[in-house]
C-alpha cells in the first residue's frame, strides 16, 4: 500500500503544481468512496430525470413505428396497396418494386451484424486484444478497397467520401500510434473485469435481440421506401430520416447497457469483489430497473449528442497534436478544441457511470464526472487514452462488413439500389456490433471513475494495473507541466522582444 500511496501522491503533487487541486486527493477520494458506498447501501428512492427527453423519444418511437408499418405495407405483395402514390404524383417514376424484394437484403444485414456481435462477445476473453488490433490496422485498407469498388461501379460521390474517410482514418491512427500500447492495456483490464461478470454478457445478448426485433420493423419500412415509386431524391430523404431514428434508438439501447454494466462494475470495485459480503443482493436487476425507469430519460437525452461530440473531440485532438509550429492553423484548431471541450463538460460518456450510481440528470452527471477528473488530474489520463476510438473502429469495421455483404447481394439482383441498401445495412451492422462493444467501454469508464474517486480501489482489484496507471498518470502530468512552462517562457520572451523593439 505504501507504493500505491506514494505513486498517487506524486501524481497529486504534479496536479497541485499545475493548480488543478488544492486539497489532499487521497482524503477527498476516500471520503467520496465512503459516500458512494453508503449511497449504494442505503438505496435511496430515485427521482425520474430528464422526463421531457423520455417523452420525446417515446413519441418518436411510436410515430416512427406507425410510419414504418405504413411504408412497408404500401408495397407489400401489391404496388401502392394504401394508395399513397397519389400524393407523390410530381415525383412518380412508375417503378413497380415490392417490399418483399428488398426485405431479405436487410434480413441478411441483421443476421451478419448479429453474428459479428455475438462472435465478439464469445471470444471476448481469449481474442479480444487481437480483434481490436486488427480493427485498428485493417479499417483504413477496408475503406480504401470499398472506395475503389464504388468508383468501379461509377458511384463517384460515395467513392470520394470513402476515400476521404480512409485518409482521415490513416492520419488519425498515425497521430495516436504512440498511445495504442496504453490503450490496449486499459482495454485488457476492462475485458478482464467484464469476463468476471458473466451476467452482464447475458444483458448484452438480450438487448441485441430487442434491437433485432425493432430492426425487423425498421427494415420492413426501409424496404418499402427503397421499393417505392418516389424519385431517388425523395427516397434518400426518407432513408436519412429513418437512419437518424435508427441511430438514436440504437444509441439509447447501447447506453442503457452502458448504465447497467457501469453500475455492476462500480459495485464490484467499491465492495472489493463479486463475492464480497457487503455486495447488495440482486444488484444486476436493480441496475436494470433503474436504467429502464428513472434514468431512462437521461439516457435518451445523452444518446442524442454524446457520440457526435466525442468523435469530433477525437479528431480535433489528433489534428492538434500534429500541427507543429503553424500558429495560424493552431489558433483555429485551438478555438474548435476549446469549444468542443466546453461541450464535453456537459456531454461525455462518463456521465453514464454517475447515472448508474446516483441517478442524477445527464448534464449534472456529466459535469460532476468531468470536475472529478479535473480536480484529481485523471483528466490527463483520460485524454491520453484512445480506448473509445479503438472500440469505435471495431464498430465501424463490423458495419462495413455487414454493408458489404448486403451490398454484394443487392448488386447481383438490383444494381441501381446498391448504395441505398448498402449504406443503411451498414448502419444496422454498426448498431448491432456496438451493442457488443459497449460492454467493454462501460468497464473502461467505470475503471476511470473509480480511479478518480479512490485509486486504492483499483489497487485492491489489480495491483499491477494500478501501478501502470499511476506511472502513466505521473508521466502525463509531467508532460503537461513542461508544456505549460514552455508556453509561459515563449510568451514572456515575446513580450520582452516587443518591449525592446522601440528602443
Image (cartoon, grey):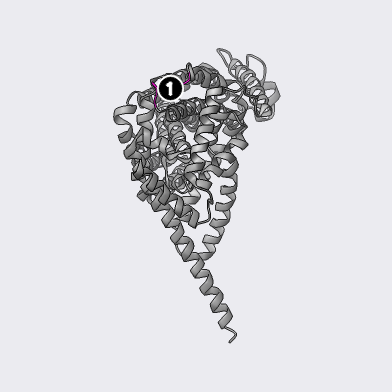
Where residue 317 appears, as percent x and y from the top left, is: 48, 51
Q: In which quarter of the image is the N terminus?
A: top left
Q: Quadrant of the C terminus?
A: bottom right
Which residue has dot 1 on it?
A: 200
Task: Decide if residue 153 is in sight here.
Answer: no
In the foreground, 480 or 268: 268
Residue at (50, 50) in percent of width and height:
316
Tell me how many marks there are.
Answer: 1
Q: In this view, does 22 lie above or below 73?
A: below
Where residue 209 appears, as percent x and y from the top left, is: 47, 17
Residue 389 within the segment the image draws in magenta: no
Where residue 500 appears, as percent x and y from the top left, is: 56, 82
Q: In this view, does 214 lie to the left or right of 398?
A: right
Residue 277 within the segment the image draws in magenta: yes
Which contiguous range is marked in magenta?
273-280
In the foreground, 43 or 182: 43
- Element at badge 1? helix
Amino acid at each position: 500500500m505504501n507504493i500505491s500511496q506514494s505513486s498517487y501522491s506524486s501524481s497529486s503533487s504534479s496536479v497541485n503544481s499545475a493548480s488543478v487541486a488544492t486539497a489532499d486527493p487521497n482524503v477527498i477520494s476516500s471520503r467520496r468512496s465512503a459516500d458512494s458506498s453508503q449511497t449504494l447501501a442505503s438505496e435511496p428512492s430515485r427521482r425520474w430525470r430528464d422526463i421531457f427527453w423520455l417523452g420525446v423519444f417515446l413519441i418518436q418511437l411510436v410515430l416512427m413505428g406507425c410510419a414504418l408499418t405504413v411504408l412497408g405495407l404500401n408495397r407489400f405483395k401489391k404496388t401502392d396497396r394504401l394508395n399513397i402514390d397519389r400524393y407523390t404524383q410530381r415525383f412518380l417514376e412508375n417503378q413497380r418494386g415490392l417490399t418483399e424484394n428488398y426485405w431479405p437484403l436487410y434480413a441478411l444485414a441483421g443476421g451478419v451484424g448479429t453474428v459479428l456481435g455475438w462472435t465478439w462477445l464469445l471470444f471476448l476473453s481469449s481474442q479480444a486484444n487481437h480483434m481490436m488490433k486488427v480493427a485498428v490496422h485493417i479499417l483504413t485498407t477496408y475503406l480504401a478497397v470499398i472506395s475503389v469498388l464504388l468508383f468501379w461501379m461509377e458511384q463517384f460521390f460515395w467513392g470520394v467520401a470513402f476515400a476521404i474517410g480512409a485518409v482521415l482514418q490513416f492520419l488519425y491512427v498515425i497521430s495516436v500510434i504512440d498511445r495504442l500500447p496504453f490503450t490496449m492495456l486499459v482495454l485488457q483490464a476492462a475485458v478482464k473485469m467484464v469476463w468476471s461478470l458473466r451476467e452482464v454478457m447475458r444483458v448484452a445478448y438480450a438487448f441485441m435481440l430487442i434491437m433485432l426485433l425493432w430492426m425487423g420493423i425498421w427494415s420492413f419500412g426501409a424496404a418499402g421506401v427503397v421499393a417505392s415509386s418516389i424519385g431517388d431524391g425523395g427516397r434518400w430523404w426518407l432513408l436519412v430520416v429513418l437512419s437518424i431514428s435508427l441511430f438514436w434508438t440504437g444509441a439509447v439501447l447501447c447506453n442503457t447497457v452502458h448504465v447497467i454494466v457501469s453500475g455492476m462494475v462500480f459495485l464490484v470495485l467499491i465492495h472489493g469483489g463479486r463475492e464480497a459480503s457487503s455486495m447488495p443482493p440482486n444488484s444486476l436487476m436493480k441496475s436494470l430497473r433503474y436504467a429502464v425507469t428513472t434514468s431512462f430519460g437521461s439516457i435518451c437525452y445523452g444518446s442524442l449528442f454524446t457520440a457526435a461530440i466525442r468523435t469530433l473531440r477525437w479528431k480535433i485532438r489528433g489534428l492538434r497534436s500534429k500541427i507543429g509550429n503553424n500558429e495560424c492553423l493552431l489558433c483555429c484548431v485551438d478555438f474548435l478544441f476549446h469549444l468542443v471541450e466546453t461541450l464535453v463538460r456537459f456531454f461525455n460518456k462518463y456521465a453514464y457511470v454517475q447515472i448508474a450510481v446516483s441517478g442524477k440528470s445527464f448534464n449534472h452527471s456529466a459535469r460532476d464526472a468531468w470536475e472529478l477528473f479535473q480536480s484529481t488530474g485523471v483528466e490527463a489520463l483520460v485524454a491520453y487514452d484512445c480506448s473509445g476510438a479503438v472500440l469505435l473502429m471495431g464498430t465501424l469495421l463490423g458495419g462495413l462488413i455487414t454493408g458489404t455483404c448486403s451490398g454484394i447481394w443487392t448488386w447481383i439482383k438490383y444494381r441501381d439500389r446498391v448504395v441505398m441498401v448498402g449504406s443503411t445495412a451498414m448502419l444496422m451492422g454498426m448498431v448491432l456490433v456496438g451493442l457488443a462493444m459497449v460492454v467493454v467501454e462501460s468497464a473502461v469508464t467505470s475503471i476511470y471513475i473509480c480511479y478518480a474517486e479512490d485509486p486504492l480501489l483499483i489497487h485492491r482489484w489489480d495491483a499491477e494495473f494500478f501501478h501502470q496507471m499511476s506511472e502513466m498518470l505521473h508521466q502525463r502530468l509531467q508532460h503537461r507541466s513542461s508544456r505549460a512552462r514552455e508556453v509561459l517562457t515563449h510568451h514572456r520572451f515575446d513580450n520582452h522582444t516587443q518591449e525592446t523593439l522601440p528602443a
